[in-house]
Image (tube, rainbow, N blue to C red):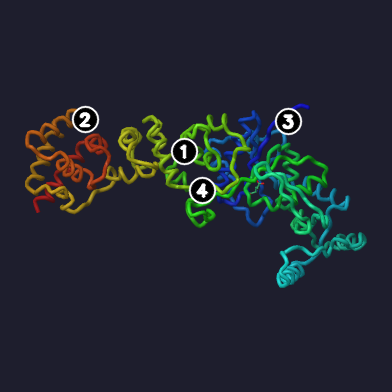
Amino acid sequence: MKKKTVRTRFAPSPTGFMHVGSAYQALLDYAFAKKNQGKFILRIEDTDQKRKVPGAEKKIYQALEWLGLEPDESPQKGGPFAPYRQSERLKIYRQYAEKLVKEGKAYYCFCSPQRLEKVRRQRQRQGLPPMYDGHCRHLPPSQVEKNLREGKPFVIRLKVPRNKKIVVNDLLRGEIVFDSNMVDDQVLIKSDGFPTYHLASVVDDHLMEITHVIRGEEWLSSAPKHILLYQYFGWEPPVFVHTPILRNPDRSKMSKREGHTSLFWYKKEGFLPEALLNFLALLGWSHPQQKEIFSLKEFISLFDLKDVSPLGPVFDLRKLEWMNGEYIRQMDDEELGRRLKEFLPRLKEEQVKKAAPLVKERIKKLKEAEELLAFVWEDIDYPKELLLQRGTDKDTAILMLKEAKKIVEEKWGKIEEIRDGLLSLIKEKDWNTGAFFMVFRVAICGKTITPPIVESLELLGKERVIERINAALEKLKT
Ligand code: GLU
């Protein structure tokens, strides 16, 4: 038999919020497809009209682009199974739902929201799970016809058989057996005519020839409904992979409330997408040589879905920060300059280029460059004492700055010569090197932590350097 082409799909709902866990799903989908010379598909699951947020779909594209996980087929790109946006496929779902109704595997339900609420409360009082009571399962066909003719609002529900075992095969977890009595008669088509996730995703996964459904653990409890749908339609189910929910170091679930669940938070903070992917790859998977830093390409070549551990991996932000710092240090200066640009909008391109090697060893996230370099565009203000904080006395500090100013003025444009000049001055006067540079650094930047100070002079320009030395001298005189 011809081996099927591996096809995976990333199927986000455009709600405006992209969880970092979704990026994890997308990475696994992408890596597994690429590893098997398969296809990675992006499908937009926009059938929940209430949750739809304008502009959210665009964010999904931006997210994948930022991560560098380019789909082979998508609403933007098209493909052999278009359309890839579920709201454009409503007719298809309707047809399949009606087919099930005809075959007695689904049914029209005309129960009012009030009745459903009553049933829910009743079951709750009896300590039963909140499920539909099957009231419309056995409506006589003539009644159904009449209701439909009268235009009564309805939904279509899945007819879940009673007293059956439904077996879900999960690649990571093995066989999981569900008791059908605990499976709700799931709504497949809602009263607004839109399908629910359950129907739409099963129909699409089948029609789009998806071979591996990789999704979060939170969908595991819905899997028996999906298996039942595959059986009812007579379709072969895909391989199911329910990946573990990401946890904080204290093992609590990563919730939306904490800023760092949103993928775009990482972008804003200046994490590099390649570092984030590397970090995500290591959640639930380890490199055969225990390597911590590796490229996406390397991950693709080594990764296999079945090696992912289903135990809740810990999302350790500190480790990600460390990794990001490593990636920054390994990056060539020019590339770093390009990446830094959006974080340093107040600097000219030339300045950003010059700044990149100066901050490289000092930042873990691109955003940190902003604070380190703010002295270039901000007016500085600091108390006099900061100049003297290494124990230098006022008169010595004044002398230091006067002498330094002479050297800077004379040798401007030649960094090496300025440095050598300052070093010989320190030696000649028998000053403490650290103390001298602290006075100099604070005078120029107004801060005690800065990029390498001599190299930083160029960022400010001669005039402003001299101005700042003069201002420090003024301060010291008072
Ligand atoms: N639309 C679902 C979600 O956004 C996708 C779940 C799945 O991958 O099947 O959570």
Return the disc, 1 or 3, that comes first in the chain's sequence: 3
Amino acid type, callout 4: Val
Return the disc, 2 or 1, that comes first in the chain's sequence: 1
**Cα distance between the residues tagged 4 and 3:** 34 Å
Numbered disc in front, either 4 or 2: 4
In the rendering, at what x and y percent does residue 404 appear?
A: 13, 37
In the rendering, at what x and y percent does residue 9 appear?
A: 65, 40
The quadrant holding residue 58 is top right
User: At numbered mark 4, what does the secondary structure look like: helix, strand or loop?
Assistant: loop
- Residue at image point 75% right, 67% down: 116
**Cα distance between the residues tagged 4 and 2:** 47 Å
Q: Badge 1 local density, few (<14 within 10 Å), some, or many (20+)? A: many
Observer-nearest residue: 204 or 242? 242
In the rendering, at what x and y percent does residue 92 appear?
A: 78, 45
Numbered disc in front, either 3 or 2: 3
On the rendered structure, is 1 left or right of 214?
Answer: right
- Residue at image point 39% right, 34% down: 336
User: At numbered mark 1, what does the secondary structure look like: helix, strand or loop?
Assistant: helix
On the rendered structure, is 322 left or right of 416?
Answer: right
Amino acid type, callout 2: Ile
Return the disc, 4 or 3, that comes first in the chain's sequence: 3
Amino acid type, callout 3: Lys
Residue for badge 1: 275
**Cα distance between the residues tagged 2 and 1:** 33 Å
**Cα distance between the residues tagged 1 and 3:** 33 Å
Residue for badge 4: 314
- Residue at image point 73% right, 42% down: 204
Q: Which mark is residue 4?
A: 3
Numbered disc in front, either 2 or 1: 1
**Cα distance between the residues tagged 1 and 4:** 17 Å
